[in-house]
Amino acid sequence: MVKKKDKPGSDALRQLLLAGLIGVAGYIGLQLQTTPKLATAGAWIIGTGSLLAMIWLSVWRLDGPQTKAHVEREDTGRALRDTLLLIASFASLGALILLLVEAGQAHGNQKMLLVLAGLGVIAMSWALVHSLFGLRYARLYYGHAHGGIDFNDKAMPSYKDFAYLAFTVGMTFQVSDTVISSRHIRAAVLRQALLSYVFGTAIIATTINAVASLSA
């Protein structure tokens, strides 16, 4: 059941704070053993992975009515959290460039660690962006004008359905068997498709760089 005793938005901001603390702890531990760039990349991977786990473990079992109630309760805090995280995800692309530049100048195990860190950063950022869009689709669907997405199912959609839509767009740059009838949701899908192209390009570039670096 969805808890109702917490203040609106408290879960989303609490998850962000806890993930941030986990990331800071990861950085402190890693910087004692490696370079600042690797420690920063490791902290992002650890913190983002922790946040994704907290988000999906908290909503995955919710059915349609519970999803609607959860969206209404969490709307304010989640919007703030998602905005901050999208900014951070794009900032991580800058960190990725620095890692790849350093990897091109490194040798041996250090080069491998930098390349793997770069792959981890882009993978976590990719998963985070599309997870945030899945949550956003839930907010838009259960917002003021209910509906806007036809999942070809009479049951109220749950977070799993919105995750399906978001990751379909993230991997194919288009919707699959869902029909979008809301202008606001179509605009969100367009933004996600464009962001997916940016991250897809970064993933391909990182993979090519990784193969070239490790084979050099």
Image: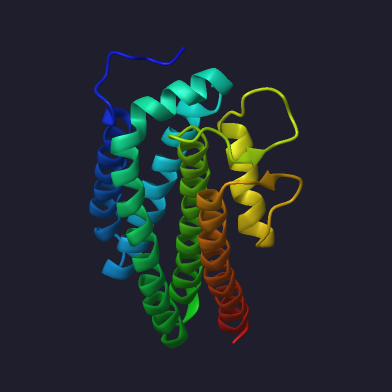
Displayed quadrant of residue 76: top left
153 or 161, which lies in front? 153
Measuring from the top left, give residue 180's x and y in whole percent. 64, 47
Measuring from the top left, give residue 104's x and y in whole percent. 46, 86
Q: Is residue 189 above or below residue 38?
A: above
Measuring from the top left, give residue 25's x and y in whole percent. 25, 46
What's the residue at 38%, 57% (across, down)? 86
Q: Is residue 216 above or below residue 194?
A: below
What's the residue at 50%, 19% (across, down)? 66
Q: Is residue 183 left or right of residue 35?
A: right
Measuring from the top left, give residue 207's x and y in whole percent. 60, 73
122 or 111, which lies in front? 122
189 or 111, which lies in front? 189
The C terminus sits in image quarter: bottom right
Q: Is residue 137 left or right of residue 76?
A: right
Q: Is residue 158 above or below residue 104?
A: above
